[in-house]
Image (cartoon, rainbow, N blue to C red):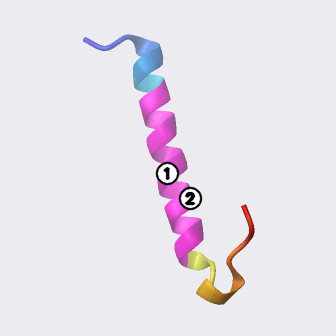
């Protein structure tokens, strides 16, 4: 069984990736922000 911090870290990473992909899909391709 995975340690609790690993589960929390993976869940946090997944939520961040899903939010990032959602925001990128909402941003028009012409208005891409510089990183």
Q: Quadrant of the C terminus?
A: bottom right
Residue 31 drawn at (x, y percent): 71, 83
- Label 1, secondary structure: give it: helix
Total marks placed: 2
Q: Quadrant of the N terminus?
A: top left
Q: Dot 1 surroundings within 10 Å: few (below 14), some, or many (20 or more)?
A: few
> Do labels 2 and 1 touch, CB within 8 Å?
yes
Instruction: Identify the residue at image location x=47%, y=55%.
Output: 18
Residue ID for mark 1: 17
Which range is magenta? 9-25
Instruction: Identify the residue at image location x=42%, y=14%.
Output: 4
Residue ID for mark 2: 20
Residue 12 drawn at (x, y percent): 51, 36
Residue 20 drawn at (x, y percent): 56, 58
Instruction: Identify the residue at image location x=31%, y=14%.
Output: 2
- Label 2, secondary structure: give it: helix
Q: Main secondary structure of the magenta part?
A: helix
User: Image height check: is 5 above or below 26?
Assistant: above
């Amino acid at each position: 069984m995975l340690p609790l911090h690993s589960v929390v870290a993976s869940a946090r990473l997944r939520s961040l990736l899903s939010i990032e992909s959602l925001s990128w899909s909402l941003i028009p391709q012409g208005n891409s922000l510089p990183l």
